[in-house]
Amino acid sequence: MKSKNKEEKAIYRKAKHEAWEWGKAFVVAFIIAVAIKLFVLDTMVVPTGSMLPTIQINDRLFVDKVTWQYQWPKVGEIVVFWTPFVDKSSLKMLGPFDKFMDALSPSKFSGHVKYVKRLVGIGGDTLKLVPAAGHPYLYHLEVNGEIPYALKNRLYSKQGIFADPNFYKKLAHPEKYRYDPNYNMLIYFNRDTDYTNYFDKASPKWGKYVSSDASGNVVIHVPKGYFFVMGDNTTDSFDSRYWGFVVDENMVGAPFLRIWPLNRFGPVKLNYIQQALKSK
């Protein structure tokens, strides 16, 4: 009987030791994962089609958080950033894993979500849409008077601020524009975000950011310390045309690897380079 008790105690001690070792391993792995998440890599799932066909709905991406801190992304590159406002519908699209990972981010981004768009302007740039030959309702984007090579095969619709120089103000305070033809859309987007709060705080820093040229076309001047983004799926992208500029500190980085679905596994940057080469 004593021998049996000794064996049971030995088994118990061994199991306890193994549980302790596994527990330590888990804690270490968790700390490493958090460190990587905070300083090196991030992950995101893309719940909408705003970047079609470049990025598909439900693509999961790894995001490089390091490079941009030493070299700012170039105009034409795809970037990931924290929204400057709460996007309620996008929050509902996030699964438990993404909510958990986002909870590890700085508290100032609590309730915010990550967007993925194409960077089309940085602080100091001047942006204007110009008609695209053969496309009566689509436009090329001029940056500082010329169409950047990386955007030559990108066409955009004239919506939001490019169609109405007062659009940001209207989105922030739609109750003042009840007779605007876009009133219902303004109400919907305003209720789905906390844009009013963001605009009222940020707009005084933006200065004179919207003007018109001699032909009456809207011209956007990107303020220093901010950037401007647009989605590739121009008719179905909630982007800077609608809500304005993003402060530089909201930048997360550049997506570099699509890890899901497996049949589309591969580098995101490569797709961008291939598309640019095709435009030659």
Image (spheres, grey):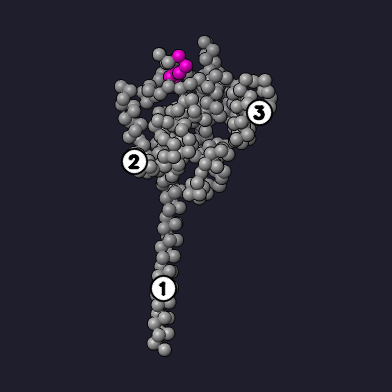
Q: Amino acid at mark 2?
A: Asn
Q: Amino acid at mark 3?
A: His
Please tell me the numbered disc located at residue 15.
Answer: 1
Please tell me the numbered disc located at residue 263.
Answer: 2
Residue 215: x, y in percent?
A: 52, 10
Secondary structure at numbered mark 2: helix
Q: Amino acid at mark 1?
A: Ala
Q: In the rendered view, would you say 145 is above or below 198? A: above
Please tell me the numbered disc located at residue 146.
Answer: none
Cα–Cα gap, marks 1 and 2: 41 Å
Secondary structure at numbered mark 1: helix
* Residue 84 occupies quadrant: top right
Marks 1 and 2: which is nearer the front?
2
Cα–Cα gap, marks 3 and 2: 45 Å
Q: Is residue 212 visible?
A: yes
Q: Residue at x 41, y 65 (%)?
A: 22
Residue 202: x, y in percent?
A: 59, 32
Count of marks overlaid on the render: 3
N-terminal of the pair, mark 1 or mark 2, is: 1
Q: Which one is nearer the viewer's eye here, 39 or 6?
A: 6
N-terminal of the pair, mark 3 or mark 1, is: 1
Q: Is residue 63 magenta?
A: no
- Say which residue label 3 marks: 173
Residue span colored magenta: 136-143
- Image quarter hosting the C terminus: top left
Circle 2 packing at 10 Å, graded few (<14), some (14-19), many (20+), is few
Q: Residue at x 45, y 18 (%)?
A: 139
Q: Main secondary structure of the magenta part?
A: strand
Residue 89: x, y in percent?
A: 56, 38
- Image quarter hosting the N terminus: bottom left
